[in-house]
Image (cartoon, rainbow, N blue to C red):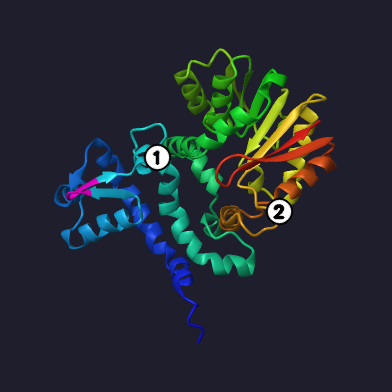
Amino acid sequence: MNDSLSPKNIMQLGMAFWGSKTLLSAVELGIFTELARQPLNADTLQARVGLHPRSARDFFDALVALEMLERENGQYANTPESDFFLDKAKPSYIGGFLEMANVRLYRFWGSLTEGLKTGLPQNEAKEGGDFFGTLYADKTRLKGFLQSMTGLSMGTSKAIAKQFPWDQYQTFVDIGCAQGGLVTQVALAHPHIKGGGFDLPVTGQIFEEYIDSFGLSDRVHFIPGNFFQDPLPKADVLSMGHILHDWNLEEKKLLITKAYDALPIGGAFIIFESLIDDERRSNAFGLLMSLNMLIELSGGFDYTGADCAAWLKKAGFRETRVEHLVGPDSMVIGIK
């Protein structure tokens, strides 16, 4: 036996679902929202969130070891990150996405092996359901999901607002805009930009409420539509964020062509995703997201920047470039 070898990394990864479910349950129980009000000792926190005494302390201390909580002199408190992102009272809350992962994805990923063997989704579709149809049918659930998408993508939205040369353009529309997080950040950073968000009509009120909260309704408006059934709105810049990976290759190429047709000569198309690195070795999040598309959708998959640039060139874009944004996210820009 080679004494320098250790199973540590194998065991950490193999049992990583322990830590994942501990965090997801903490979000479900409202631990971080409770501690955002004030630090609490174990007995008080246990009572506030309704836990049995048997494992409560182990649960709280596991969150400390996982660096989701801090503990000092017997008082539990949020870390700066968990306080900012996991307190339901803050607009930066991303727990809605984790709540969805807890209720849905955690159990569906238990069927990953079946999905890999069959190539078929492992979610509600197995019983004749439809993820998007179910989500968009419940306005309360939809609003929570869109809010979590805004928080989750805030760093990326701010990076796009900063990195892209907006001074060269006048109008911008985000396709599949959700709550309007990206167009809001662009409009706040660049007062000359006018535009809006294009999405299914059911999201309109949620979008408009969010835009109004920033005082941007004079420059940013909602455009209802279906990006497969309707022409895309015309603007100097169009974007699709975390959209293309939902669809199969033919559908991806169709959406790219529709964006090309809607843009003027010199117009720009921004696509941003958790792009897989071109060598397909280092962006584990992007690769795992692609496996999540297998779980969730019939044809979706993630892709590399080189893949996307090739699709843009084939659609007619004369120039492309790939730029890293934040975390696992990067953008591909095509110029018509």
Sort mark 1 into few (<14), some (14-19) or many (20+) by Cα contacts within 10 Å.
Answer: many
Amino acid residing under circle 1: Phe
Please provide percent x and percent y for residue 275.
64, 48
Judging by the rendered image, the residue that carries numbered circle 1 is 85
Secondary structure, mark 1, is helix
Q: What residue is shown at x 26% (from left), y 55% (from top)?
A: 60
Q: Nearer the viewer, mark 1 or mark 2?
A: 2
Above-or-below relation of 31 to 16: above
Above-or-below relation of 54 to 167: below
Please provide percent x and percent y for residue 143.
45, 34
Dominant secondary structure of the residues highlighted in magenta in the image? strand
Magenta segment: does it hold 36? no
Question: Which residues fall within the magenta stretch?
Answer: 72-76
Please provide percent x and percent y for residue 277.
66, 52
Judging by the rendered image, the residue that carries numbered circle 2 is 278
Out of 260 and 267, give the one closest to the viewer. Answer: 267
Q: What residue is shown at x 40% (from left), y 31% (from top)?
A: 91
Please provide percent x and percent y for residue 4.
49, 78
Quadrant into which the C terminus falls: top right
Amino acid residing under circle 2: Asp
Out of 309 and 254, give the one closest to the viewer. Answer: 309
